Image (tube, helix red, strand yellow):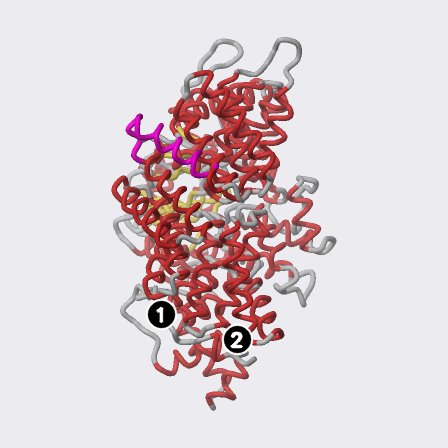
Amino acid sequence: MGSHSATLPVSPAPLVGRDGELGRIESALADPQFRLVTLTGPPGVGKTRLALTVAAATANRFADGVVVVDLTRISREAALGEIGRAVGVGEVPGQLPRDRIIETLAGRELLVVLDNCEHILPLPELGETLAACADLRILAASRERLHLTAEREIAIAPLPVPSPSDRDDPDLVAANPAVALLVSRAKAFHAGFAVTPGNAADLADVCMRLDGLPLALELAAAQLRIFTPGELASRLRYRSISLGGGHHDMPERHKGLRTAISWSHNLMPESERALFRRLAVFVGGWTLPAAEAVCSASSDDSVIDVTSAMTSLLDKSLITRTDRPDGVTAFAMLESIREFAAEQLDAHGEETEMCRRHKEFYASLALHAERGIGTSDEDMWWIWLGYEHGNLRAALEHSLKSGDAASALWLAAAVGWYWYTRGYIGEGHAVITETITATAGGAGDAQPPADAMAAALLVAGILAWSHRDLDTAADRLRMSRELSERSGDVRRGAIASAFAGHVARDAGAYDEAVGHHERARDIFEQAGNERGIAWAHFDLGLVAWRRGDLDAAAELFGISLLRFRDVGYEWAVAWSSWALAGVQVGHGDCRTAAPLAAEALETFDKVADRRGVAQSLEVVAQIAVDQGRSETAGRLLGAAGAMRRSLAVPGMTTELDARERTEKAVHRSLGRDRAERAFTAGRSLPYSGVVALARRVVGVSAADEVATTARPTPREREVAALVASGCTNREIGRTLGIAEKTTEVHIRNIMGKLGAHSRAEIASWAVANGVYDPERSTS
């Protein structure tokens, strides 16, 4: 190792969750094509630590060693001189630092690590130095690339955080890289700290709130000396805690997350700072047209070049870019950075104006979205609602706060459709009720527009019906229909009639329900609305099903299924498949019902409709009973019930009756105690596990599922089955007559072959592929 390696500092704590990044950086440094490797990423993502770790691991590859240059407090003009001093170049009067460096480093095989480069850019002399020194390599840590020839940029992202569906599974939480880092650092203050069933969800929430930023997680770990995970999660949720301080040997700029972000902010020109703070008004992200509409104009009539400024913010890693599946490019800020930007927005007195522009922009789009529901443009608006519900919700709050009744009603109508189609019935019912109450009695003559009120009342009625508040639902749907007919909006009137039929059916007024649905069908037929016609057949099928006329119901659901398939309406296909599966179960034909239930389950899961998943689980539970798998049926019912309670959606009468029959069948088969244990086990199953269990019942294998050609060996399948049964490594070893260490090796091999990250994922695979059957579990 060369003489300059002594300048390489030692990282005080090991990296966690960065094996992939370390490998990519080392490979890039070994590639002669790239003389400069630049690590970019947002403040606090861990670029410096990664650079130092790689430098330590690769130092012996460089005959003249490694030199680290911290440029934090160095101006651009002095940067090259500082680099020269670090590599041992003396000053020569009248000679440029670049020339001295080139002369000194020519022929030397050296790695130079440049830390914190963003404020010295541009620095073309560095590129000239690289071009002249063939054996020189530079590893730079910067919030934006150096824009030099032969540069390889490696973007460092925050650590992955648990998904909301994984937060209640201690195994999945413990295996998550962000949580692993938090726990690892917390052990410095509390040696016995670990993920437990009691704190898993709170630790997951902390990591999600902190975006998986390593610096934020390390600072949060220090707070666990004082707070429990639950207290810390609550304080982060309500922003009642500041992540400052940290270890004394941290760089000064890293002792507080705010300080780290402020460092980047202060380097920007004013036009970029203005856009940066204004973008904080968006929730969950934005598109370029949205940013241009909301953020471009200034109070002094100057206009920000949004495209140019956003490009610069992207280069500086202060915003991120995503290419959405719908072909739209979207941008976002990490929440930690967004909070800082919001503080700047408030400090500059622009928050009220930005909220007004944001509200007006999204209210205008919400109006168009509501008018697209029930038309051929509906799919486009469903996709848009899914991506923009955070902004719509924020704009609704702005509208209510400012007393803008029209905007509030259009926004409530649009976001209400999102709540309904995704199964968030409890939340939607409460918020839209609040909106209508707040806007119904305008001050003086300031009554809200009838069209906007009709739109909001329609969705309010639908959510009230889904919430089983039939009287409120009937009243709001009637008022919406009357207002719509008065304004000549036959589309909205037809939808109101259709849902009035649902209310009547659930109230036992079947003839009235048929009248409403036939009226809606007639309107849709006159308008040539194929989707509306298909929905009318589906709705009439629900009435027939409720009346017990299974043959008529099957015929009507079959028609709706074919029509929905013809127009490519996936979500509606799932509803028709679910209903037809339920009717076939009622006929005793579970063999025909299984693929229909599988299709419904897969589609509801794909579009994130948890209510649809819950009702599909209940049909699959009926099929499991028919197969003699009562233990599985009990677990599925327990999981479905937990989902319904979390969404505050009880279900239609037909569903509730079928569920009750299935529960009774499980009790008869298992006995009261075993049945209740099965229900309880289902309620605690992670989402991925219960979906995998349901897939197994209806014949969907998780494959084929293993994407690689490697498959678990017979011995590994035995181990996987015992993992799924809840056995510890020691118990598995005793059962199979192998050492505990051998069991650990088998589990690592299984994880590698399956791409799994936890024992819970192994268990889900084992159930889905028939390696483990819950029916054989100990009672």
Q: Residue, x 51% and y 25% (percent of image)? A: 480
Q: Nearer the viewer, mark 1 or mark 2?
A: 2
Q: Is residue 336 above or below residue 290?
A: below
Where residue 94 appears, as percent x and y from the top left, is: 40, 30
Tell me the magenta residue range: 512-530
Report the front residue among 373 and 394. Answer: 373
Residue on which disc 1 sits: 753
Disc on the earlier residue, 1 or 2 = 2
Q: Is residue 233 magenta?
A: no
Residue on which disc 2 sits: 669
Q: Residue, x 48% and y 62% (percent of image)? A: 690
Identify the residue at the far bottom of this view.
737
Where residue 40 appears, as percent x and y from the top left, is: 42, 43
User: Is residue 277 rendered to the left or right of residue 718?
Assistant: right
Q: Is residue 497 above or below residue 239?
A: above
Q: Residue, x 45% and y 66% (percent of image)? A: 761
Where residue 349 appears, as percent x and y from the top left, is: 62, 19
- Of the 4 image quadrants, the one containing the C terminus is bottom right
**Amino acid bearing label 1:** Lys
